[in-house]
Image (cartoon, rainbow, N blue to C red):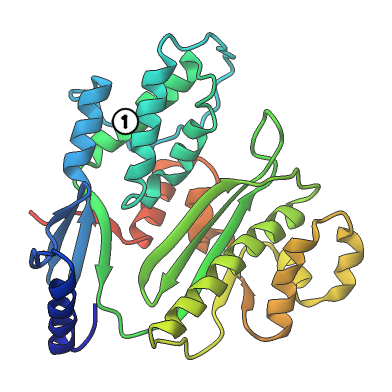
Amino acid sequence: MGSDSSRVDGLVAQLARTFKIRDMGPPSFFLGIETMSLSDGILLSQRRYIQDILRRAGMVDCKPVSTPISVARSDVDDSTPFADPTHYRSIAGALQYLTVTRPDLSYAVNRLCQRMQSPTTADWAVMKRVLRYVKGTLGMGLCIRKSESLALHAFSDSDWAGNPDDRKSTSGFAVFLGSNLITWSCREQRTVARSSTEAEYKALADVAAEVTWLVSLLRKIGFPPDAAPGLWCDNLGATYLCANPVFHARTKHVEIDYHFVRDKVAKKELQVHFISTKDQLADIFTKPLASARFSLLRDKLNISNAPP
């Protein structure tokens, strides 16, 4: 890619003299991802891939739901092993690839993949709900629009001790370049956090590593950020911990590699800011949400329906 079409064409011609290649023109459909042109950008969708997943799961005619994970927790502990674990793993793996253009599925798919070793009938019920949500949002995809800004900023969040089985926390982040979402993550933390501040601090360390790599990449391709990237966190304790070394006395047990985020702040390579929970976009990656809240955050992640 490049801003000078003649130089791009020249490079393609040089490659063609050495390798057997073919210019297939503007992108349309590649590796299950469909590219649709918009008036101000493109939409990346996996509509046909979703239809294939629904056929494999036998849920083509299922009834849609508004969210992939229910907010209400079931009191029934159904530990009956699922009859066909291979089928469960196959569908879970397919859904994992779907998150390439559907960040709104990240938390739900993360939960499903944690149960791949020994899925139960309750896990299959959760998967069917995710598929019902996918059915209702068949035409949705990730929008990439023209942006005047090259500012890099990220939202980081954590759900403290959200896993009832091992009490580990779930971290999530969303990184934007200008107005476009370019990378995101939902993952369970490696160790149990003793406080919400510790859980949020660990999540900040994860996104700090991602942003550091992105800054390096942007510099290599000739688009260095004009200012230090901003990280937005909804935990005051974690933001203070990034700037005040006095707080380190309370976190002696925290693994050393997490403390590098404070060094980045001290060197003015990153800026950590507080943001209210209601404005925290990464909330969608860490916990189940009610329908209205989920739809609001999904829209802010630039996930929308394909044009008619």
Left or right of 178 in this view: 20:
left
Task: Decide if residue 56 is on the left or right side of residue 306.
Answer: right
Residue pointed to by mark 1:
131
Give the x, y percent position of residue 234: 63, 63
Q: Quadrant of the N terminus?
A: bottom left
Q: Quadrant of residue 167?
A: top right
Residue found at x 46% / y 12%: 82
Q: Position of residue 175 (x, y in %)?
A: 47, 67
Residue at horizontal 64 percent and vertical 75 percent from the top:
272
254 and 140: which is toward the camera: 254
Q: Nearer the viewer, residue 190 or 250?
A: 190
Where is residue 94 shown, x and y percent of the image?
Answer: 33, 35
Q: Residues within 10 Å of mark 1 (few under 14, many from 20)?
A: many
Residue extending furthest toward the front:
18
Q: Does residue 250 appear in the picture of this structure?
A: yes
Horizontal side, residue 274 vs residue 39: left or right? right
Q: Is residue 124 above or below residue 106?
A: above
| Secondary structure at numbered mark 1 | helix
Total numbered circles: 1
- Residue type indicated by callout 1: Leu
Quick one: 25 or 225, which is closer to the camera? 25
At horizontal 25% and vertical 72% (from top left) the residue drawn is 145
Up the image or down, 185 lies above or below 291; here it is below
- Please name the residue shown 64% across and 58% down the image: 203
Residue 306 visible from this viewpoint? no
x then y, percent, for residue 11: 19, 81
272 vs 257: above or below: below
> Based on the displayed image, in which of its 4 quarters is residue 149 positioned?
bottom left
